[in-house]
Image (cartoon, rainbow, N blue to C red):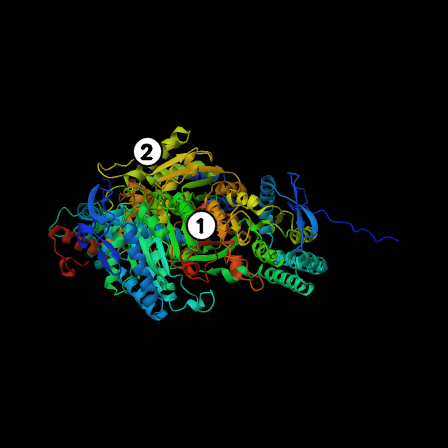
Amino acid sequence: MTAQTTSTVRPWDRDAAQVAADAAGLIGSAEIGSTALRRYLFGLPGVDEVGAKGRAAQLGTRSIKTTSKAWALDMVISMIDLTTLEGADTPGKVRSLVAKARTPEPGDAGCPRPAAVCVYNDMVEVAVEAAQGSGIHVAAVSTAFPSGRASLAVRLADTADAVAAGADEIDMVIDRGAFLSGDYLKVYSDIVAVREICQARAAGPAHLKVILETGELVTYDNVRRASWLAMLAGADFIKTSTGKVQPAATLPVTIVMLEAVRDFLAATGVQVGVKPAGGIRTSKDAIKFLVAVNEVAGERWLDPDFFRFGASTLLNDVLLQRQKLATGVYSGPDYVTID
Amino acid sequence: MSERLDVRKTYKLYVGGSFPRSESGRTYEVVSADGAFLANAAQGSRKDARDAVRAARAAQPGWAGATAYNRGQVLYRVAELLEGRRAQFVADVAAGEGLRTARAEAAVDAAIDRWVWYAGWADKVAQVAGNANPVAGPYFNLSSPEPTGVVAVVAPQRSSLLGLVSVIAPVILTGNTAVVISSQDRPLPAITLGEVLATSDVPGGVVNVLTGKTAELAPVLASHMDVNAIDLAGAVEADGVTWGELEALAADTVKRVRRPPTDTEPTWLTDASLNQVLAFVETKTVWHPKGT
Amino acid sequence: MTAFEYAPAPESRAVVDIASSYGLFIDGEFTEGSGGSLKTINPATEEALAEVAVADESDVDRAVAAARRAQQKVWGPMPGTERAKYLYRIARLLAERSREFAVLETLDNGKPIRESRDVDVPLASAWFFYYAGWADKLDHAGFGVDPQPHGVVGQVIPWNFPLLMLSWKIAPALAAGNTVVLKPAETTPLSALLFAELVQQAGLPPGVVNIVTGAGATGAAVIGHADVDKVAFTGSTAVGKSIAKQIAGTRKHATLELGGKAANIVFADAPIDQAVEGIVNGIFFNQGQVCCAGSRVLVEESMHDELIDRLKSRLGTLRLGDPMDKNTDIGAINSARQLQRINELSDAGEAEGAVRWSADCAIPENGFWFPPTVFTQVSSAHRIAREEIFGPVLSVLTFRTPAEAVAKAHNTPYGLSAGIWTEKGSRILWMADRLRAGVVWANTFNKFDPTSPFGGYKESGYGREGGRHGLGPYLVEGSTR
């Protein structure tokens, strides 16, 4: 690891050739082949599970109070991808979600808005229309989310659909089967192909979040390798989970990914984002993640461009805590809106 | 026809697998219990003690690195050789300690049996003195005994073979090496034991035997900075030195000190004990996380 | 971008009442001392906390006499099951009053409240809980049937983990049926005195636990008392040697936990992020005032620069300051004297040619502080690589092969602990076999548990504390020397 560069490259600003060149530089091979990838990924340092969990537990003991808590709560809100991913989603539900994102705290114009709403592909149009002019991004879960078990053609078409419908961000899933069977080149090529569609978006590149589904990768060594594989292939964000598999976003997994983006920045000058998704429901938990971001990756990641929370119920808990801080008394669920 | 003149043995030190004379060139007269001349034994010096420590240190990693099974076999082989020399030991013990033959035989038999008893501990002590520790966390945690290193042994003054065996065998079975100061006045069985060891599979340097004046040699070893532990069994009833003085010298390097069990020398008839072994081991505890 | 500033999150001091003066705890009561008094201060602020009595020889004599009476009349004859219940009580009381103990420990010692709260106090309680269960199972501990206690035990403990060291000493001693006279360190007597109150609360018979405060002379009086059967000491190697000398020629048994200069060995294939954490925890835990601190990092040469870079950025996130703040990682050095020693050795390191780097952190105006410091280009000949600094100062050396790592690790008169960081299992076991240290942490560091024996090789002392092995030295049949 070298000293952190002062000027960083935003990953989505790189064209495909630059991504490939960065990857080639790292793995030390002009051709990104199966053997070179494997050799590179297995050359990464291992992760000791108990040690990683211990670090997470220790960071979890940080006590964030008063002014720092107020700052953190607002930062959390601004990093939320407010999410609905249900079979029962309807246009009405999605509009309501966007409305919530537009006005998280009625009567308090100072309350920040979430970074994005995150919906299924077919709801992108509805969400884009509802979010018009709000600055709230629309993220689409694509590529045969959540399992990804469809042909590449179908997954690419899925992505193209979402981009065409106006999605600002694409949350794709990697092929965990390919990863676990050792076909790293397939995982890599899939991401490259999806990225190409994102980059081709007329209104500028759609940001690509690559979901590792860490609950299926199981080991932290796998999480680290998958993180690097995704970054080599051009991920703008690496994301823990679909939210459909348990465990989803745990603090230690997120720390392993934060270490990966930190080291990737040091190695390439490119700052990739991280998005834990699924299972973060309370302000207390979210603030632990912020502490981890601050102390593991560094404060340059305390920015919605580089850190997001994928969550559906977190926002309301943060709002309750925010009210408590403002008024000094505990609030209750009747005092925040449901989406 | 005249009677055949016997060939007498020259008694020397046993250091690093060889039998050198004392570098000082000194010897001292060893007499039987009734005052008859037996031999001139080498009177070891400070430098001999230093050389013995060096030999013991050099031999220690290899001896400790042998498998416990191998050490057990090697030590058992020593018992076989002791048995083969039984008659000579009986004669030595009888003359030196002034015992009638039957009692000398009993002492030698007990010594051989004790050696066998300790030899058998080589591959068991870790199981008895070591254990897994159920720590409150995801860690593998195991404690096991390991040899302390180089152990100085002040051998008992009276019991020249049984006492000697009772303090050497427990030291070396775990992988320690020993520098032994024999009984001052009854040193001959110690040198004969050295001859047995030299012809056994015990590597040179594992046991080193110094004969001479306890009061001259013991303080050198007690204060030697490359000695890890000292057994003071023979410092009771030694001329010119007390075990307390030696223990105080040993304190300067935090040596492990096995005090004499009682203020007079025991008979050693019932003194086989695991504690005698454990006095010269260190407990090492290894932690490792358990995770995927 | 706004930096994420952590607002102060101080633990409340109100949970503990500190009296203005304390007496000695002898025979179940607080009594006057005859040796004058000493002040104990908060090393983070230099504020005086309390006046504490100093025990002289006559006081120690009273304490030993009380302990002897209690051992012979009450504690020795008491069935193990009853002794066990007293110890369980103490464990529970410690847990119940944990916050109080944590705050007091931090005030008197200067260690971060996070550590006293999460490590010292819970472990102290766990120690009593563990040994409580042995009290009625001594027959099964591997020391023969019906093993016997020594009688009266004299114990002298250091200032770095005042309550925890007290529990390491008292719990196994009482479980085995001994009674104790314990002397806490002169700069950190308060948690032991609060413990004395807890002993009263537990209803422990008078004389079973006696606490005599004071400095070195008091300690020497405890160790040297003719009616003490066994001594146990944790502290410096120099004092340990003098104790070994003091008891030479007597029939007193001893356990000594002395200094260390542990090697924390990092191979190029280490789980690097956890290794960095392990190094940080190894040397900056309790400001490095830990006998088993990993004060020497031996790093495989090919990994040196990367490790140093990572270590420096990690140290940049350590928070030094008010020990009572829950977010503080590095607290105060325990005393002016200790700070002076750290300064002296660090200056020597620089003078001898090692390269000094300290984390950039603001040092509070009052109190005793030393920033986390790393020396690179250290050679085995430097004083900072040989002498125990007992402060937040790390020396980094390199090695090329496993055998060289072992040789360098051994190149010290100490042998308390060692660390190994590598992903290769067989190499861990190879190294662990060879390292002459009482505790070997592989891919972890500074872990403690009441079931796990702790103690050193060579000049780091002898005897073990913790686990079944820690029980033996408090029993006649379990004492090998």
What chain does badge 2 belong to? A
Amino acid type of the residue tagged 2 in the rendering: Ser
Please say whether residue A82 is visible from this viewpoint.
no
Residues packed near mark 1 inside 10 Å, few (<14), some (14 to 19) or many (20 plus): many
Q: Which mark is residue C248?
A: 1
In the picture, the quarter occupied by the C terminus of chain A is bottom left
* Nearer-the-camera pick, B12 or A177: B12
Left or right side of A124 for C348: right
Q: Quadrant of residue A284?
A: bottom left
Q: Secondary structure at mark 2?
A: loop
Q: Secondary structure at mark 1?
A: loop
Q: Are marks 1 and 2 on the same chain?
A: no
Residue found 14% across the figure and 61% down from its top: A334
What chain does badge 1 belong to? C
* Nearer-the-camera pick, B9 or A33: B9
* Nearer-the-camera pick, B77 or A170: B77
Give the residue number, with chain letter if any, for mark 2. A7
As measured in the structure, the alpha-carbon distance from the residue carrying label 1 to the one carrying label 2 is 68 Å
Residues packed near mark 2 inside 10 Å, few (<14), some (14 to 19) or many (20 plus): few
Farthest residue, direction right: B1
Residue C24, horizontal then vertical, whole percent: 24, 54
Residue C121, horizontal then vertical, whole percent: 29, 55
Residue found 24% across the figure and 62% down from its top: C200
In contact (CB < 8 Å): disc 1 and disc 2:
no
Amino acid type of the residue tagged 1 in the rendering: Ala
In the picture, the quarter occupied by the N terminus of chain A is top left
